[in-house]
Image (cartoon, rainbow, N blue to C red):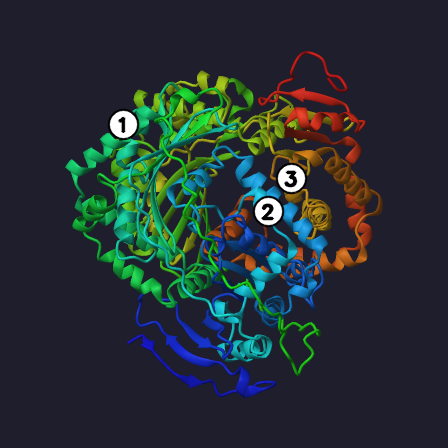
């Protein structure tokens, strides 16, 4: 028996009012054998706060998560977006925490933090070195019990503007960004808690006032509506003692009843549509109502979605994508607390209408009925879901998030065992039954997302209008709410100190160079039974430096390597991998073709056999090449509708020049992709697949002696020396700052990219590393000057940052942000002001101290997961770093001075010599920019000049 239900008070002395605050242990879960379970203890305080503690001493890390059982489902018509808005306000200080101090304290502690809101819950979390536990609990308790007096009208207005910018960045300014909003509005009855998105509507955000927000807090943010989950390198008794101290005195909030809504029923297929200014291809989105989360049919619906549209072995991929009728075809089963949705989403190739796509979708459903569910379908589903659950336990964060969500939504933190049993029990009959019950012959919302000027490709004429006549606003009990603070007999204003610094161990690793010049590096990690393998073969984008007419060849070649082999079709390969719960993916990078493998240890031999097949037996066919070439061309065209993608591409071109390989998109351009032939792909394989200087990274539950014999097949790689063309690290100097303006009509935001090529190559202990330290105060974190100015003080953006990026070839400096359109000229003034000030005055003493604290304690968080360990040792192999390079970095950090930082700022931050790329609505932003004094060059989305003249203004 792994479960022990206990109803005992924890016998430990509290620091005050012991009887009132003492926690009761109600459940303890332990692991028996190798079962998939997260051990924990669960407590409840007298004020109703549920506390879950999961000890995990594998890394010196602790995660603190507070999840409130309130999301957008507790809102109402006319007041949408409250839950998410309030998430922002929870970071704006409380009685004992100053404005912006929450972020600063966590960062200063070497940690990370964030919050998230969905339909059903809102959570706040900090991941920090384990010696920072008490401080994190104090911070979370302070905003649970002492928030409202710190909520000012000014903070309210700034965060309202920030949320609007978040909506602009993630919804209004993004292709297909309003799809889910329109679908939900037409699927659910008017006033249903899921009929609007968590972000809310702009008009509602404009309507809300600070008192509405305060009432929202008083109604839903009581301890009795919250779960505090602490996981990591802690002792449960210590956690409970601190929780009793800081959370125990907080008064209970109003009682919270479960939301009950009737199941959604549609009386006909609802055809609806809208026009999207940011797209060039239409999209059809068909949604059927299903069941709430954790319903008995949840696994079968997930399996059904996988069969119909889960990757390249699915029916829709076979019928629509492989036949080049559609660019994308996907199926999802998304279940939430109150209801579920089964969605089919297709983007057709040019020339195909959404009506055509709907017919093909319905034909594919009929084909599924005749085909039925196979044993292989069930094996794929079970293998895939098992691997997902195992990999989800790699990090403390993954465990804490699961425990918190399970407790909040089901009252049972140990749901992982239940879900595994549910998944393992799924049968072919179950999957067919849910298809017949929820999809076959059932009505759906059929949404057409239409490019401007292509309204004729609609799936069907709009036939549904929302009925608003039966809506009665819910009474959530906002009347007569009273704000009562905790009464303490300790000084809550005193900031807790730090515990003893944790001992951070850099992952132990082994290295091995083979006679054929393959270089191995590995790290054993027994925390979960999985293995990650990364093989990097020299080549990639840089190979095209001498033949830029075929840029994108490496990327297209990698795509072809993911397709058929001599003994497996791509569908057969995918099926075998899914049954194993494994992944084999081939990608291209700047200087390599990369094979990434993830597998459960028990399946490593079968997975490596499939890797060997993929590596040595590719089958390059004309039909596959034609399809991938066509898909690549359409994807490149689609990217031109995304302002952020356009900004990145144009910035690279402006920085490096149109003829420099690093100024060209690694995926190619429309013209270069058209130049590539099947023979080019075949020649790439023949000429550039080699053992020489191939790098292999291994992390997981396997030893060096176990893995090397299993990879002996790599000895069959040919020995060829691949010489990458030499490139100029700094191809040109910027003579003066000027604006490069790209017009995206009706863009809600302007994408900013400001910077230049520094030529500063990666160096773990040299000037590159020191430049990163210098950048921290300017824009390297949330509390960087540019973010505090533009987001927290002005409310013009969802986020702003500066970065130094470098590799073994070159390096650059970039400021990036999405700014609301109407603030474009003002934001440009502010950014340049910050850059000039940093160049002239350098870092402040308090910023230097903050930077040293924040970066100096990060190591605890750097090596936790398998992929983090893989990234760490991969960098050691790639740059031939010494084993003690982290110790060297820490010494540099400890000893670096203000004069050194200031000198680096003067050397690398040159606001008078930077390229300024702005991608936005020319009609809205040009008049202000013309007053800026900068020369303005208009470019198209390909980065080419519009017209022949460069002039100031137009």
Which mark lies nearer to you, 2 or 1?
Answer: 2
Give the residue at mark 3: 817
Disc nearer the start of the sequence (2/1)? 2
Which mark lies nearer to you, 3 or 1?
Answer: 1
Disc nearer the start of the sequence (3/2)? 2
Q: Which mark is residue 205?
A: 2
Q: Which residue is painted at 65% across and 72% down in the image? A: 498
In this picture, residue 611 sits left or right of residue 20: left
User: Disc 3 on helix, strand or loop?
Assistant: strand
Instruction: Give the quarter of the image for residue 794.
Output: top right
Instruction: Pinpoint residue 468: horizontal percent, then vertical percent.
Output: 43, 43
- In the image, 195 versus 301, the foreground residue is 195
Q: Which residue is painted at 29% across and 33% down in the image? A: 316
Q: Which mark is residue 639?
A: none
Instruction: Pinpoint residue 924: horizontal percent, then vertical percent.
Output: 68, 27
Instruction: Pinpoint residue 187: horizontal percent, then vertical percent.
Output: 37, 42
- In the image, 946 versus 266, the foreground residue is 266
User: Disc 2 on helix, strand or loop?
Assistant: helix
Q: Which mark is residue 359?
A: 1
Please indicate, yes or no, whether residue 724 appears anywhere in the rendered image: yes
- In the image, 83 versus 603, the foreground residue is 83
């Amino acid at each position: 028996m792994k479960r022990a239900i206990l109803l005992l008070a924890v016998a430990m002395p509290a620091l005050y009012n012991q009887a009132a605050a003492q926690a009761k242990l109600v459940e303890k879960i332990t692991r028996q054998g190798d079962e998939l379970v997260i051990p924990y203890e669960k407590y409840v305080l007298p004020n109703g706060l549920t506390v879950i503690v999961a000890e995990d001493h594998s890394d010196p890390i602790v995660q603190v998560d507070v999840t409130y059982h309130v999301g957008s489902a507790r809102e109402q018509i006319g007041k949408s977006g409250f839950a998410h808005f309030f998430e922002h306000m929870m970071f704006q200080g409380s009685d004992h925490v100053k404005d912006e101090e929450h972020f600063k304290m966590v960062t200063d502690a070497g940690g990370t933090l964030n919050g998230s809101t969905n339909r059903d819950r809102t959570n706040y979390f900090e991941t920090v070195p384990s010696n920072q536990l008490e401080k994190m609990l104090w911070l979370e308790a302070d905003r649970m019990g002492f928030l409202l007096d710190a909520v000012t009208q000014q903070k309210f207005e700034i965060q309202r503007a920030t949320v609007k910018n978040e909506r602009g960045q993630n919804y209004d300014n993004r292709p297909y960004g309003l799809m889910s909003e329109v679908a939900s509005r037409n699927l659910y009855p008017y006033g249903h808690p899921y009929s609007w998105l968590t972000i809310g509507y702009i008009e509602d955000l404009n309507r809300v006032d600070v008192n509405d927000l305060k009432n929202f807090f008083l109604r839903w943010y009581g301890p009795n509506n919250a779960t505090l989950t602490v996981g990591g390198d802690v002792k449960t008794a210590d956690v409970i003692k601190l929780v009793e101290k800081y959370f125990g005195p907080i008064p209970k909030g109003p009682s919270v009843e479960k939301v009950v809504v009737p199941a959604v029923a549609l009386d006909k297929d609802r055809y609806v549509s809208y026009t999207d200014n940011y797209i060039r291809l239409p999209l059809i989105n068909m949604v059927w109502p299903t069941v709430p989360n954790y319903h008995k049919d949840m696994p079968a619906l997930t399996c059904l979605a996988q069969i119909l549209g889960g990757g390249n072995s699915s029916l829709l991929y076979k019928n629509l994508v492989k036949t080049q009728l559609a660019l994308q075809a996907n199926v999802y089963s998304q279940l939430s607390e109150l209801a579920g949705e089964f969605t089919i989403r297709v983007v057709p190739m040019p020339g195909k209408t959404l009506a055509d796509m709907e017919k093909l979708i319905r034909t594919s459903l009929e084909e599924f009925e005749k085909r039925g569910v196979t044993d292989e379908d069930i094996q794929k589903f079970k293998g895939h879901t098992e691997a997902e659950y195992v990999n989800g336990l790699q990090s403390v964060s993954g465990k804490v998030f699961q425990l918190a969500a399970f407790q909040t939504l089901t009252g049972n933190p140990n749901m992982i065992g239940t879900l595994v049993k549910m998944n393992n029990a799924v049968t072919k009959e179950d999957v067919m039954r849910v298809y017949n019950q929820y999809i076959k012959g059932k009505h759906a919302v059929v949404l057409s997302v239409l490019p401007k000027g292509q309204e004729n490709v609609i799936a069907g004429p709009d036939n549904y209008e929302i009925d608003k006549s039966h809506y009665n606003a819910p009474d959530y009990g906002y009347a007569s709410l009273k704000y009562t603070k905790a009464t303490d007999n300790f000084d809550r204003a005193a900031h807790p100190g730090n515990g003893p610094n944790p001992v951070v161990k850099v992952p132990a690793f082994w290295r091995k160079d083979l006679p054929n010049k393959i270089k191995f590096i590995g790290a054993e990690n027994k925390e979960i039974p999985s293995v990650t393998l990364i093989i990097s073969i020299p080549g990639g984008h840089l190979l095209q430096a001498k033949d830029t007419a075929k840029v994108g060849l490496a990327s297209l070649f990698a795509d072809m390597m993911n397709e058929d082999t001599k003994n497996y079709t791509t569908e057969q390969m995918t099926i075998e991998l899914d049954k194993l719960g494994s992944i084999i993916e081939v990608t291209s990078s700047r200087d390599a073709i990369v094979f990434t493998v993830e597998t459960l240890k028990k399946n490593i031999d079968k997975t490596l056999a499939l890797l060997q097949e993929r590596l040595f037996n590719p089958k390059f066919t004309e039909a596959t090449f034609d399809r991938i070439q066509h898909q690549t061309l359409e994807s490149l065209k689609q990217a031109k509708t995304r302002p952020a993608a356009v900004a990145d591409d144009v910035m690279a071109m402006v920085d490096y020049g149109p003829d420099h390989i690093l100024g060209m998109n690694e995926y190619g351009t429309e013209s270069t992709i058209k130049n590539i032939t099947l023979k080019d792909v075949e020649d790439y394989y023949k000429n550039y697949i080699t053992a020489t200087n191939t790098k292999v990274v291994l992390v997981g539950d396997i030893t060096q002696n176990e893995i090397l014999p299993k990879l002996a097949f790599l000895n069959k790689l040919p020995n060829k020396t691949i010489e990458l063309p030499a490139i100029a690290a700094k191809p040109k100097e910027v003579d003066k700052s000027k604006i490069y303006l790209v017009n995206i009509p009706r863009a809600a935001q302007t994408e900013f990219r400001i910077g230049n090529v520094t030529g500063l190559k990666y160096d773990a202990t040299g000037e590159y590393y020191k430049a990163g330290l210098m950048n921290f105060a300017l824009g390297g974190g949330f509390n960087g000057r540019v973010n505090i100015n533009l987001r927290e003080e002005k409310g013009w953006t969802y986020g702003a940052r500066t970065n130094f990026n470098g590799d073994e070839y070159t390096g650059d400096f970039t400021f990036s942000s999405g700014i609301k359109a109407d603030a474009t000229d003002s934001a440009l003034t502010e950014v340049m002001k910050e850059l000039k000030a940093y160049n002239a005055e350098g870092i402040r003493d308090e910023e230097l101290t903050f930077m040293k604290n924040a970066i100096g304690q990060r190591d605890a968080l750097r090596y936790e997961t398998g992929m983090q360990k893989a990234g760490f040792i991969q960098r050691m192999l790639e740059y031939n770093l010494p084993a003690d390079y982290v110790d060297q970095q820490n010494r540099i950090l400890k000893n670096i001075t203000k004069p050194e930082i200031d000198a680096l700022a003067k050397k690398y931050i040159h606001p008078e010599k930077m390229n300024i790329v702005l991608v936005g609505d020319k009609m809205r932003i040009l008049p202000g920019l013309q007053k800026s004094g900068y020369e303005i060059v208009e470019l198209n989305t390909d980065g080419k000049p519009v017209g022949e003249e460069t002039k100031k203004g137009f």
